[in-house]
Image (cartoon, grey):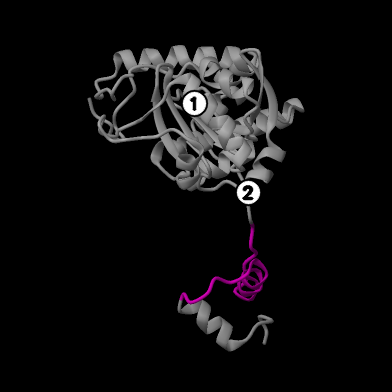
Amino acid sequence: MRARTTQSAISRIERDKISPTVETLRELLYLLGEDLTLVAEQRDSGIDRTLNAERLKLSPSERLDYGAAFANQVIAMSPLPRREAW
Amino acid sequence: MVNDARSLPVKAPEVGRLLGPLIAHGVDFVLIGGQAGIAHGSSYPSYDLDVIYARDRDNVTRLVTSLGEIGVRLRGAPKDLPFILDAKTIENGANFTFITPYGDFDILADAAGMPSYNELRAAAVDREIFGHMVKVASIDHLIAMKRAAGRTKDKLMVEEYIVLADEQRRAGDEG
């Protein structure tokens, strides 16, 4: 086979039964006159790295103190119902 | 008062007060969940304290003693539901969610996405937290557990934890 795979394998790819390996995909695209290019890019997760950098300057206890203060502030401002208290 | 998933406790947990008795009695546990994430540098708030505990009888006995000192009640259970805090009860169950005078406290035998307890413990980092040396689950195991939990808030936290793991590696800090 020109694509270095079997007709049945190509048939299964065409019928969405299997996903081709990167190498098979590269071969198939080559035979179609195209080159496969894979690009990995950093995902834009919307995380503000400067916030984390500030946290990392603190000790674990200071981070937990800060976290508790923040959580208590959220609780005080939240319209969500409260769970039972001790 | 309500106890559904979209409710909040009346206050954030007092981590030092909850972990202190466990440390004092030599309980074998690993801090996980949002508080572990915060200890690693996460800026997401967390409203309870989660620990995974070793299931051997001696450890469960020490855990029960600690819980007795803290003062715990089953969260969300009717107040007249009988609950006997002893090793047999803990062994017959696995994961318990408590309300305490110091905030919501969950003790878990296992959590989705975690490896064996021994693996979790071996990869955990020792961190000084309010004067106690505490084993905090590794950021990679926290990512695995948050991914397995799969709620929207967990997915958001995973994104931040991945950034934190990256920052830690850059800083040459494993924890």
Q: Quadrant location of the C terminus of chain A?
A: top left
Question: Rounded to the nearest whole Å, what is the CA distance between mark 1 and mark 2?
Answer: 24 Å
Q: Is residue A40 above or below residue A73?
A: below
The segment highlighted magenta reads A16-37
Secondary structure state at the residue bearing disc 1:
helix
Secondary structure state at the residue bearing disc 2:
loop
* Quadrant of the image occupied by residue B61: top right
Q: Is residue B42 left or right of residue B74?
A: right
Circle nearer the viewer, 1 or 2: 1
Q: Is residue A83 above or below residue B82?
A: above
B10 or A76: which is nearer to us? Answer: B10
Q: Which residue is depicted at the point 51% across and 22% down?
A: B43
Q: Is residue B116 left or right of residue B87?
A: right
Give the residue number, with chain letter if any, for mark 2. B116
Give the residue number, with chain letter if any, for mark 1. B67
Q: Is residue A81 above or below residue A68?
A: below
Q: Which residue is depicted at the point 63% across and 51% down?
A: A39
Residue type at mark 2 is Ser
B71 or B131: which is nearer to us? Answer: B71
Q: Which residue is depicted at the point 53% across and 45% down?
A: B110
